[in-house]
Amino acid sequence: MLVWRIAALTSGVALAGCLEGTGTFSAGGQGDAQRLADARRSDAAPDTDAHPGPDPDARPGPTPDTDAHPGPDPDTDARPGPDRDAYVDTDARPGPDHDARVRPDTDAAPGPDPDAQPGPVPDALVVPEPDAHIPFVCQFGDRVEVGTVASRDADGQPRLVETSGLMQSRLNRDVFWANNDNGNEHRLFALGRDGTYLASYELDLAGSQDIEGLAMGPGPIAGRNYLYLGDVGANWRIWGCSTANVDTGDCTGCPNIPARCGGGICDCRGRELHVYRTEEPAVAPGQDFTAVADVPVETFVLRFPDAMLGRRQDVETMMVDPRGGDLYLVTKHTTPALLLRAAAPLRSDAPNVLEIAGELPWGGESQATGGDISPDGWLVGVRRYGDAHVWERAPGATIAEAVQGPDCRIGAGEIQAESFAFDVDGSGSFFSLSESAGHETVPLYRYPRQ
């Protein structure tokens, strides 16, 4: 039986070779011997080359790569799907070239490019809330005079004659920033800890009138510090008051306003304020005095909410929250003091409408003249002419929630104090610098927390 099967298979293979006209196989050749061996193995396992259709080895032309056979490719771990090692050039296949595929660029993802969206680029959050917090204790020692600031230079030219803002540098050790108010030259001054002048920076603040606020906070580039200057002072201006008679201050037609605006200006156009931002420059504590001109700034417009209609708009306190960049103002001539908030990121292409975020619990007119939020975000400080108040911020609390809690009151009467700056050492101590008010020099004070 076995001899018959071998003979039949040999004859069939030889006949197929003749029909194909290849001349590859013959009855007595080496190929026939190989097929005899294959036939003997067929009793134990089927020949994988015996699938229907012509024998691939008998086709004319070069022997194709066995990896091109239909079915799973052994080189691809027997995974179903097309053979990745096939000799077919992918450039010749319809559709995209698979050989040219690379990891997609996230900028090419469907939808608008974030960099191309209108509006401001969100400011970077530079100070997250710390995990650990040491509770604040309201205990301050006597103030210490750490420096003396001259109101004029050696040639008698004015420098800090009406100091309104003071910030301790976050970038330069033992360096302070200060500015004048009320229409003086638009310059930022860098001071050493002993009060010596290190540099002045002339800013392009065209059209500004009363730069009262100075703050430090985050900005568009993570890890960098930015100075904010606020053209927010207005003295006697009241939003919504008639301008029929500016010279006499006639407030006819103004809702809830006395017959006269305190002898000042009644301005129905005073709804908008301006804030300027610039990156903090690098200053060496002991450097020679340097004057820098044409410092670029970003300009932001703040707009009072409708709820401020008929209220005096004078503001001298501006702060920036290091934990998110929200900007805060505290009104000076309202009862009670109003805490106004402009949410971050500030828009440069449209007005930023302020919201009334809260009230400070003082009786009578606020008289708030300066303030700051500590670099770690735990403390909020606002000073008036005769005292300063510090609030502790509970974990997870907003600035508005913080100032509703108990405050720590510190006696801080000075010549005419309009500045407040927390020490960057994290102690809760703070610095204060007064206007010169006709004095040749004024002291730079530190109020140490014990």
Image (cartoon, rainbow, N blue to C red):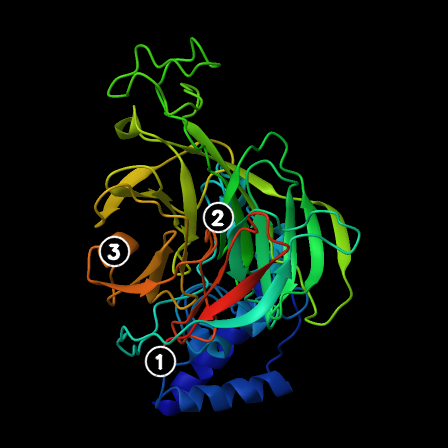
Give residue 401's mark: none
| Nearer to us: label 1 or label 3 | 1
Image spot of residue 312 (x, y percent):
34, 30
Image spot of residue 109 (x, y percent):
48, 48
Which residue occupies the foreground of this view, 110 or 234? 234
* Vertical position of residue 234 compared to residue 180: above or below: above
Local SS, label 1: loop
Which residue occupies the foreground of this view, 130 or 407? 407
* Residue 120 can be seen in this image: yes
* Residue 59 can be seen in this image: no
Question: Residue under circle 3?
Answer: 403
The residues tagged by marks 1 and 3 sit, at their Cα atoms, a distance apart of: 22 Å
Which residue occupies the foreground of this view, 305 or 265? 265
Q: Is residue 324 left or right of residue 11?
A: left
- The extreme top residue here reads 244
Which residue occupies the foreground of this view, 416 or 160? 416
Q: Please give the name of the residue rendered at 30% of the width and 24% of the height, measured from the top-left corner.
A: 309
Image spot of residue 221 (x, y percent):
55, 57
Give residue 109's mark: 2
Question: Residue under circle 1?
Answer: 450
| Nearer to us: label 1 or label 2 | 1
What amino acid type should be assigned to the residue bearing mark 1? Gln
Q: Is residue 258 left or right of residue 269?
A: left
